[in-house]
Amino acid sequence: MNRVLTGSEPRVWAALQDPANAHLLDYVTEDPFGAHVFPGNVPGYGVDDFLADLSDQLTGTAPIHLWSYIPTCAYKCRFCQYPVVLVKGGRNEEKLSQWVDWNIREAEIWLQRVPELANAPVGEFNVFGGTPSLLPEKDIRRLLGFYRENFGLTEETTIRFEGDPSTFTPAKLETLRELGCTKLSSGVQSFDDDVLRECGREHSAQMCVNFVRNAQAAGFEWVSIDLMYGLLDQTVDSVKRDLDVVLENEVTAVVCTKLHLKSYAETRTGVAGEQPAPWQLPQYREKLVRDGHFWPALQEQYRMREVLTDGLRAAGYTEHPTMYFARDGLGPEKWKSIMVDQDKQEAEVAIGLGGSSSCRASEAITDVNWKNYAQAVEAGRVPLGSATGFDAGAQEARAVKMALSTLRPVRSDLHRARYCRSLHDSPWREKFGSLAERGLVSVDAGGVSLTEDGEVLVEAIINTEL
């Protein structure tokens, strides 16, 4: 069944109904992903080409963003498109240790192939997944110890650890604090138990609240959660309650994500496993509707987004980049600013199954088949499955897109310094002129700024018009 929107239409709805923006409506209706990750446009690019580009950039780099992916999960959510390895049964600890072994071995291969990595300063080091918080204490110590000893982690480096709310036990929190982690991230997704159950999540809303409170009590300076909107059986009122819980518990940062049902692999704007998530299968979605469930209509999804955006901003949160909110004085997200801020846009290196790495000239995705990945690592090869390059025009366009995603003004002087032409020169004059005519950006002598509608539609704008 289709939901009928109750209450006022979302403010962006008028812009989406403008015939001049039909392509933007098509984009958001088709539901792809990617405000911050852009595929290259030079085919036939090899892994060696990417590693050479990365090596060149790292010779004079500012702080980079370093990832360590541990792909293990106790279960797989019904919306998850990422390659994960399930660890259940009596050999859990052995399986978890094996993935730490492979991660460390892969990191050693990267260091051999790109020696400049050892000395590149690391702005933020993120241990993501999967669910790395499933790791036993000894493996957490071993993993973090290796990266501290072999990469450019300094006293200025932020160390961040991700996990499921139910796995961040008080003992594990104590270990992470002892090892220098100051940031925690958790995919809460919702504080509505019914919505969580339909997602296939095996934690309760109360477990999520307990995680936030325990992390705060343990002294973590940054406790971030992910919320999703557009989920099965989710309503605007449910999202309002999610917001209330966030504000009541003074969560440091919130990442708000729309449910994406289009395959990441199809658009190559993310990584994906070999099999689609259940919710990506039309027949599965249709069966859920026949069984009495509902998917929020597009208007309702934008009302959910509006509830979150308005509520967080009113409570003193700053959005930077799009849909990444941090309490005033604590943002922006450090690892995102390293990658997307107009005056930074440094490299990111992702080690582990499902990683996506990039530098200014090219990008590469790690093999998502775990058997192929393991064979490559055991054979001493960097397990990158594909790479593409950016020609000069694509590098410039990528820089503009990433800068726009910060929701900050894109400065013409910074652009000229990097690319020897202004945002008021062709082709940008025509592109931004069209957007300005439709009320999506404003243009002045200093550069370009998104309007309110432009901020809401920034994903569609940067992926269809720039």
Image (tube, rainbow, N blue to C red):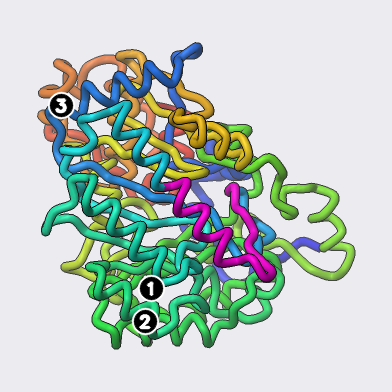
Which quadrant of the figure has residue 148? bottom left
Query: Residue 342, percent across and down?
Result: 20, 37
What amino acid type should be assigned to the residue bearing mark 2? Leu
Q: State whether residue 104 is above or below residue 237.
A: above
Mark yes or no: residue 397 visible.
yes
State the residue in front, 455 or 207.
207
Q: Nearer the viewer, residue 48 or 7?
A: 48
Q: Nearer the viewer, mark 3 or mark 2?
A: 3
Tag on residue 311?
A: 1
Circle 3 residue: 59
* Alpha carbon separation for disc pair 1 and 2: 9 Å
- Mark 1 or mark 2: which is in front? 2
Q: Secondary structure at mark 3?
A: loop
Q: Earlier in the sequence, mark 3 or mark 2?
A: 3
Cβ atoms at labels 1 and 3 below 8 Å apart = no
- Marks 1 and 2 in Cβ contact (< 8 Å): yes
**Residue tagged by mark 2?**
247
List x then y, in percent, for residue 310. 38, 68
Callout 1 amino acid: Gly
Q: Counting other residues with Cα less than 10 Å from the Cα at mark 2, is it few (<14), some (14-19), or many (20 or more)?
A: some
| Image quadrant containing the N terminus | bottom right
In the image, residue 419 lies in the stretch drawn in magenta: no
Crowd band around label 1 with a 10 angstrom C-alpha radius: few (<14), some (14–19), many (20+): some
Residue 315 falls left or right of residue 14: left
Q: Quadrant of residue 155?
A: bottom left
Q: Please give the name of the residue rendered at 23% of the width and 35% of the height, measured from the top-left corner.
A: 117
Q: In the rendered structure, which segment of residues is drawn in magenta? A: 82-103
Which mark sits nearer the N-terminus, 1 or 2?
A: 2
Q: Is residue 410 left or right of residue 224?
A: left
